[in-house]
Amino acid sequence: MRLATLDDGSRDGHLIVVRRDGAAHADASAIAPHLQAALDRWDEAAPRLAALAGALDAGQAAARPLDPRALRAPLPRAYEWLDGSAFLTHVRLVRQARGSAPPPGLTSDPLLYQGGSGVLLGPTDPIPLGDPAWGLDLEGEVAVILGDVPLGAPGGEALRYVRLLCLANDVSLRNLVPGELAKGFGFLQSKPATAFSPFAVTPDELGPDWREGRVHLRLTVRLNGAVLGSLDAGPEMHFSFADLIAHAARTRALTAGTLLGSGTVSNADPARGVSCLAERRVREQLEHGAPRTPFLRAGDRVEIEMRDRAGRSLFGAIDQRVVESPPASQGHHPHRRPGAPPPGPRTA
């Protein structure tokens, strides 16, 4: 089944089930008012949501047209957002770009950081551009949404805690990264709000393409309509989601609703392209002596999508425009994403 969150003006939005073709939805609020509530009692809620999804696909449930612009992130705010860097080609290239050596234990010890999770962007929310000198970049990723994970959960059991999968655009400010990392305390200002795909899907939706804790499908990233990359998300993911979950839970339990990202999807073959501009720039540096591709600018359009083997847009498309940030003094509505239009009436 595929789940999504309608914007109804509240902090957590309104849970819906999405039809297989992505064109219609059914109201799921009688089962759980929002996705976090469903995750909190997943064993009870999941079978009922699956039954509603089956009825919707069979034409036996009330269906309404679905407008992706009305959707929030599946979890508009989350208890935790943990992001890995499981594609080692990406690690090596971005380290090279900033003149840093790969970390010790690169192939044996997963890289993870804890990002901001209080404000998460929806699939069509604008990407705010502050100072262009900060180097605004996109990062196409796969992510999982977890149930409760006990302290010390071993890798062999970790995948049982995966409830849903989605895509992410882990926005980065590349030129702020070196200064922050030099302090020895990690990312903060260089990692603004992350955006997520319209739909979060249960692992069974992927069939055999979800195996060994990896998604074996192509991730397509476009910039201003041109393909930036068409990347295999499975074979070169060095650390699986099982590895990342076990690493994160080594010294603490994780609560239901934790988001965990794969890190930037990256392939060694340059013909596959890239899912972030930093990689393209370092390849240009190596080939031409200097980067030729600028970082994101106001008006740029970013699209991130993954299709299954039947051609269906599995998670829906992240489709965002870069916009100049409004003055800080303007503030924003506490229940609405910065830059988003006011919510309309509930459509579910």
Image: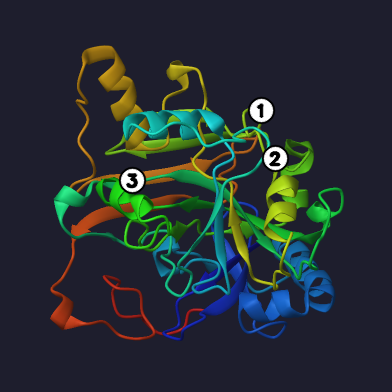
Are the two marked residues, 2 and 1, in contact with CB atoms closer than 8 angstroms?
yes
Residue positioned 37% across, 51% down in the render? 181
| Residue nearer the viewer, 15 or 174 | 174
Query: For residue 207, what is the image quadrant?
Result: top right
Residue to which mark 2 is pinned? 214
> Relative to 77, is 53 on the left or the right?
right
Separation of residues labelled 2 and 3 (CA atoms)? 24 Å
Residue to which mark 1 is pinned? 235
Q: Is residue 247 above or below residue 88?
A: below
| Residue nearer the viewer, 213 or 41 | 213
Residue positioned 59% across, 42% down in the render? 312
> Relative to 302, is 159 on the left or the right?
right
Residue positioned 78% across, 74% down in the render? 42
Q: Amino acid at mark 3?
A: Val
Q: Nearer the viewer's eye, disc 3 or disc 1? A: 1
Separation of residues labelled 2 and 1 (CA atoms)? 8 Å
> Residue 64 in the image: x percent, y percent?
55, 70
Residue positioned 78% across, 79% down in the render? 41
Residue 143, can we see it?
yes
Q: Secondary structure at mark 2?
A: strand
N-terminal of the pair, mark 2 or mark 1, is 2
Residue to which mark 3 is pinned? 302
